[in-house]
Amino acid sequence: MGKPNSKATLKEYCLRKLGKPVLEVNVSDDQIDDAIDYTLQKFNEFHYDGIERVYLKHQFTQAEIDAARADSVVSAGPPEFKEMQNFLVVPEWVISVDNIFSFTDKGTANMFDIRYQIRLNDLYDFTSTQFYHYYMIQQHLSMIDFMLEHFKPIRYNRAGNRLYIDMDWRTDIHAGEFMIFECQRATDPSSYTKIFNELWVKDYATSMIKKYWGTNLTKYQNVQLPGGITMNGEMIYNNAIDELKKYDEELRTTYELPPLDMIG
């Protein structure tokens, strides 16, 4: 199948590209699975199509709030040290957590509320204010709203899937209230099957399988196959290494998003 849309069809595509069935590709099924899994993991880590922005909604329970208020002893001492358990366990496919947003009712803000005063002076005369200027001001006001009302320091540990929220868990949140999390999620190939047909994925997976093939053949140097063919495992391995270096550089220079401080 020229356009793989699953792990199985990608596997067959890579093997055909390496010469199957004309040549016997000496790799095990587990090695092929490892090669494809590694390729997809690298795709999720660095390719701009490997992640997507999502907004996750979570409703807090009293049990979560009580647990976040509690302390755990991290060092019995002396001196003794304790750490707050102010974290939520997020799904493992979350790569990063960028922002959090709590729900508030801005419609009840009184005239002495700072947001009300900012907006009151925003469009003092709508007839003389251009829409572009209004739009730009709204963008800045949205950021001010976030800083004044929503900003709460967060720390995300991906290894443990823990999102620490450094807020006052006694007053800032109550049972039954919601919070929105702006996250980056790894795209799931089983849902986004076009990933299997990405040029970079097909090329990199093929080279990874070739690397395993070359590694296996180096165990048996100068073995002559039926028909007088001699397989050179070292050459296959070195070719695979050169290809992987090229594809790694292509991934980081062409398909990786630039750091945030370089955007703008």
Image: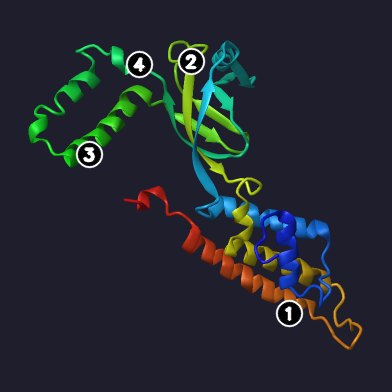
Q: Secondary structure at mark 1?
A: helix
Task: Report the residue at 11% width, 30% height from top.
Answer: 126
**Neighbour class for label 1 at 10 Å: few (<14), some, many (≥20)?**
few
Q: Amino acid at mark 1?
A: Met
What is the x, y in percent for residue 188? 62, 45
Q: Amino acid at mark 3?
A: Met
In the displayed structure, 169 sits above or below 13; it is above
**Neighbour class for label 3 at 10 Å: few (<14), some, many (≥20)?**
few
Mark 4 or 2 closer to N-term? 4
Task: Report the residue at 50% width, 32% height from top.
Answer: 155
Q: Which mark is residue 105?
A: 4
Residue 186: name its quadrant: top right
Q: Which mark is residue 235?
A: 1
**Neighbour class for label 2 at 10 Å: few (<14), some, many (≥20)?**
few
Q: Is residue 251 left or right of residue 17?
A: left
Taking depth in this image into account, of 205 and 66 the one nearest to the observer is 205
Mark 3 or 1 closer to N-term? 3
**Quadrant that contains the N terminus:** bottom right
Mark 2 or 1 closer to N-term? 2
Q: Amino acid at mark 2?
A: Glu
Mark 4 or 1 closer to N-term? 4
The span from disc 3 to disc 1 (Cα, nearest Å) is: 59 Å
Q: Which mark is residue 136?
A: 3
Q: Secondary structure at mark 4?
A: loop
> What residue does disc 2 label?
177
Q: Is residue 216 left or right of residue 179?
A: right
Q: Which mark is residue 16?
A: none
Q: How is the image coloured?
A: rainbow
Q: Amino acid at mark 4?
A: Asp
